[in-house]
Every structure is written in C-alpha cells, then in structure tokens.
Amino acid sequence: LRESRKKPREAMRRQAKTPIRRARILWGTALTIEIADTRAEDLETVIGEAFADVERLTSIFSRYDRSSEISRINSVGAYRPSTGRSAEFTRLLKLAMEMKDRTQGLFDPTWRRRDPAELDLDGIAKGYAVDRIVALFKRNGIEQALINFGESSIAALGAPNGKAGWEIVVRDA
C-alpha cells in the first residue's frame, strides 16, 4: 500500500477490537459488565478488578453468603458492637437508616422473614458496588460501558459506538 492510504496504527487497533461483555453470579444475581470503549488499555485487568471488588463487598453485604458481615450480624439477631463492623458496613447502614427516615419507612433496610427482623442492605449496597465500578472505569479512561447488577442497579457511561445510548430492558413487575 502507498503510505498515504495506510491507516494510523491507533485507528487500526481500535477497529480490530470488539466490545467486551462479562458476567458473573454474585450476591445471588447476575452482575454484567459491557464495555464498548475499546480505546482503553488492559480492559480485562480492569474488569477483573471490578469483579474482585464486588466479591469483596459480597463478603460484607450479601445475605447469600453465610460468612458475610451482614449474615454474622443477622445470626445473633441484633446489631451489636461485638459482632464487628467494617467502616463500609457502618457507612451504608447509616445511609440506609437516613433513607428510612427520609422516606418515612417506605425504604426499610430490614427483612421481616423472621423475628427479630434481619438487616438487608441490598437496596443500597448493590448501588454502592455499581458506583465503585463506575469510579474504577473512569480512573482507567473507560468512557463507554454498561454495568447491570441484577437488573435493579444499573449505570451507563457514554453510549456504544454508532448508537444514541445503551439498550436497557425494563421488565413488567
């Protein structure tokens, strides 16, 4: 090829890559990450970091993990200092209680399947996990991504190439 017809190396690298989509079952549901921004470097490493962080959060907030911090607290039937609390757990529990007050009890961080009621911070903790993934992606220059955590906590960065936005399906309840 003549030099004038060659594409710049960077443009060729972008065209050669395809969007990445990865999913894992965490916290009793699917966490799906889709990245259309193929300009960012080390996408698989960053995705691995995102999943590792959510796995760490699972060990704190997931009721599906019997060894998690919230499960240990629920197993003693009360929130006591002796059960041990991480800073993240304390921060999100405080936020959940503020939301309960602000919504006059419409948002309730307890799960009343047994007496006494158990703590359930899924409504806030999954959103917190998604926010952490968004921050990680931004720090790594990822500008086009969709994070879907159980269809209840979703964040979108930019839009996929050639589209006005991400397609998100909302199911009928």
Image (cartoon, rainbow, N blue to C red):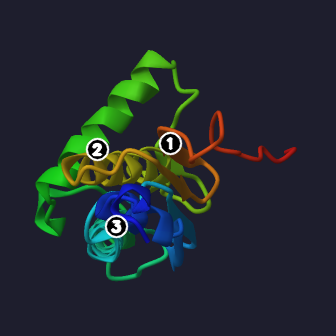
According to the picture, the residue beneath numbered tag 1 turns out to be 156
Of label 1 and label 2, which has the lower sequence position?
Answer: 2
Q: Which numbered dot is residue 92? A: 2
Q: Is residue 123 above or below residue 60?
A: above
Residue at point 53% right, 69% down? 18
Of label 1 and label 3, which has the lower sequence position?
Answer: 3
Residue at point 25% right, 54% down? 136
x and y percent of residue 108 in the render? 51, 37
Residue 95: image quadrant is top left
* Outermost right residue: 172
Do the CB atoms of the residues marked 1 and 2 lie less than 8 Å apart? no
Which mark is nearer the camera, 2 or 3?
3
Q: From the image, which quarter does the N terminus lie in? A: bottom left
Q: SS class of the residue under badge 3?
A: helix
Of label 2 and label 3, which has the lower sequence position?
Answer: 3
x and y percent of residue 92 in the render? 28, 44
Which mark is nearer the camera, 1 or 3?
1
Q: Nearer the viewer, residue 145 or 63?
A: 145
x and y percent of residue 163 in the render? 65, 40
Label 3 crowd bin: few (<14), some (14–19), many (20+), radius 10 Å: many
According to the picture, the residue beneath numbered tag 3 turns out to be 54
Label 2 crowd bin: few (<14), some (14–19), many (20+), radius 10 Å: some
Q: Is residue 69 visible?
A: no
Between the C-alphas of marks 1 and 3, the distance is: 17 Å
Residue at point 56% right, 73% down? 28
Q: SS class of the residue under badge 2?
A: helix
Q: Is residue 158 visible?
A: yes
